[in-house]
Amino acid sequence: MVWNKPYGMKEGFLIGGGLILAGLVLELSCGPVDWDAFRWPMGGIVLAAFFALITIIFLLRKRVRGFQFIGTYKAAIPALVYAVVLTILMGLTRQTSLTPDPSSMGEGSSWINHILNFWPFVLIYAYMALILGQVVLRQMKSWAAANFSLFTLYSSLLSHLGLFLAMTTATLGNADIQRLKMITVKEETEWRAMTSQQQILEMPIAIELKEFIMETYDDGTPRRFASDIQILTKTGKNFQTTVEVNKPAEVDGWKIYQYGYDMQMGAMSRYSVLELVRDPWLPLVYTGIYMMLAGALLMMLRSIPWRRGVEQARKHPKTALLLCAVIAACFFCVHHFMPILHSDTLVPALQSPWFKPHIIAYMLAYTLMASAAVIALYLLLQSKQGNLYNLVCIGISLMTIGMLFGALWAKEAWGHYWSWDPKETWAAITWFAYLVYVHYRQIPTHRPRLALWVLLISFALLQMCWWGINYLPSAQGSSVHVYNMSS
C-alpha cells in the first residue's frame, strides 16, 4: 500500500482531492462559506487556532508521517496545481460580486459564480496556508541552527512568511473591512453613507463639499478630478483637504477616496461621490506585502549567476548572443505593444508613482518568461536538456514585485489591495503556475521534460493574463483594469 512508504506526489494529489470532496460535502450540507461570520473577534480566534494547529503539527512531525509530509515540495506542488485549476474556474466565469454575499445566491446563481464562497476553493487555499506555516517554522529552525546560507534563507523565509501573513490576515480581515459610499453635495454637510446592500449608516465623520475640481485634456477627457472637502469628526478634528484619484485623505482610521461625480455635468458637477474605507487588519497585510517584496528582491539577486554567467558566456559566445537576442526581441515586442507607457494623456487612475514601476517589473518578467518558453520549446523539439531554473526565478521575482506594486497602487487608487478582479485573478493563476515549476525543480528526482512542459503551460496562462482576458466574459464590464474616461 502507498501508505507504507514515504509520501510522494501521489499522496499529495490524494490529499488535495480529499479536501475537494470534503468541500463538496460541506457545500451541499451547509451551503457556501459565510465570510461575515469571521468578523472580529471570531476572525482573531480562528487565526489564533490556526497558529496553534500549525505549531502542533510542527511539533508532532517526527511522530506522525502525514505531519512530516506537510511542508514538503511534494505536498506544495499538488496544492498549487489544485489552486491553479480552481482559480481558473473563477477566471473563466463572471463572478456576481467581488465580495460575494451568500444570501444573494438564489435562483439563476450557482457556486461557479461565487467561487470565493465555494468550500473546495476555501479548503485548498487553507491547506496551502497550512503548508506555508510548516515551511516557515522549518526555515526558522534552520535559521536558528545556521544550517543554510543566510542569504538564501532570508530570501526564502521572507517570501514564505510574508505570503503566509498576507494570505491569512487579508482573508480573515476581509470581514472587518467597511467600504461605504457617501454622496456629498456642494455647500452641504453630509454624515450619512451607504453600504453595498443600500443600507444608510450614520458616520462618525461629517464631510462638506466645498468645490468639485476637474481638469481636462485638449480632447475633453479628464486629466484630473478632485473634491475640495471640509472634514469634521466626533473626536474634534476639523480641517480642509483635497481628495483625488490616487491621493486619498485619512482621518481616524478611515481613508476617503474620490470615487465619482455627475458625468453628465462634468466639470459643473454639483456633487461628488466619495468612498470611505476602514480596514483594521491593513497593517498586518502590509507587513506581509513588504516582507514578500524584500524576499523577491533577494531571490532575484541570488538567482543572477554573476560570476558563472560571465564564464559561461565566454565558453559559449553563440549561445550567449542567442539568449541576449531572444531577450531583446521579447522586450521590444512587450514595449511596442504597450503604447500606454508613452502616453501623454493618462487617465487619472494611471497617474500614480506606482504605475511605471508596476508596468516595468511586469515587462521585464514577461520578457524573461517568454525567453524561457522559447528555450523550453527548443529543448523539447531537440530532445535536449537545459537549466532554466535561474532564469525563471529571476522572472518570477520580477513578477512578484510587479504584482505587489500593483496591490499597493490599487489600495491608493481604489481602496482595496486585492479584490479578485479578473486581471488580478489571472495574475494569481500565472504566479501559482510558475511556482509549480520552481518547486518541482527543487525535487531531486524531477523529470526535466515534464518541467519544460510546465513552463510552456505557465507561459500559455501568462498570455491569458496579459491580453486573453479581454475576450473573456468574466472581464466584460467588471474589471477595473479597463480604464474608461472616469477612471
Image (cartoon, rainbow, N blue to C red):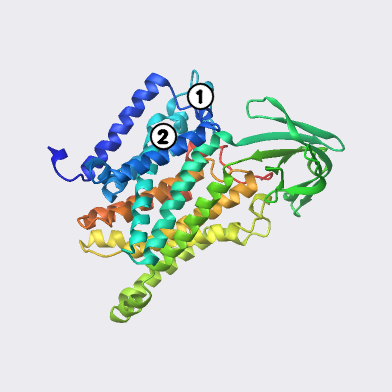
- Residue 198 as seen in the image, left or right of residue 24: right
The correct choice, above or below, for 329 with respect to 466 in the image is: below
Residue pointed to by mark 1? 102
Residue type at mark 2 is: Val
Quadrant in which the N terminus is drawn: top left
Location of residue 271 by image quarter: top right
Percent of width and height locating residue 302: 39, 67
Eyeballing the image, is 59 above or below 447?
Answer: above
Closest to the observer, 199 or 359: 199
Residue at point 21%, 64% (across, down): 384
Residue 139 coordinates in the image, percent (x, y): 35, 56
Quadrant of the image for the C terminus?
top right
Q: Secondary structure at mark 1?
A: helix
Q: Is residue 350 left or right of residue 398?
A: right
Question: Residue 122: which numbered mark, if any?
Answer: 2
> Given contact means CB atoms under 8 Å apart, are the residues at marks 2 and 1 in contact?
no
Q: Look at the numbered disc 2 and give the secondary structure of its residue.
A: helix
Q: Name the N-terminal-most of marks 2 and 1.
A: 1
Query: On the rendered structure, is 16 left or right of 169?
Result: left
Seen from the viewer's position, the closer of residues 294 and 80 is: 294
How far apart marks 2 and 1 lie (CA) works out to 14 Å
Circle 2 residues within 10 Å: few <14, some 14–19, many ≥20: many
The disc labelled 1 sits on which kind of residue?
Pro
In the shown orientation, is residue 418 left or right of residue 351? left
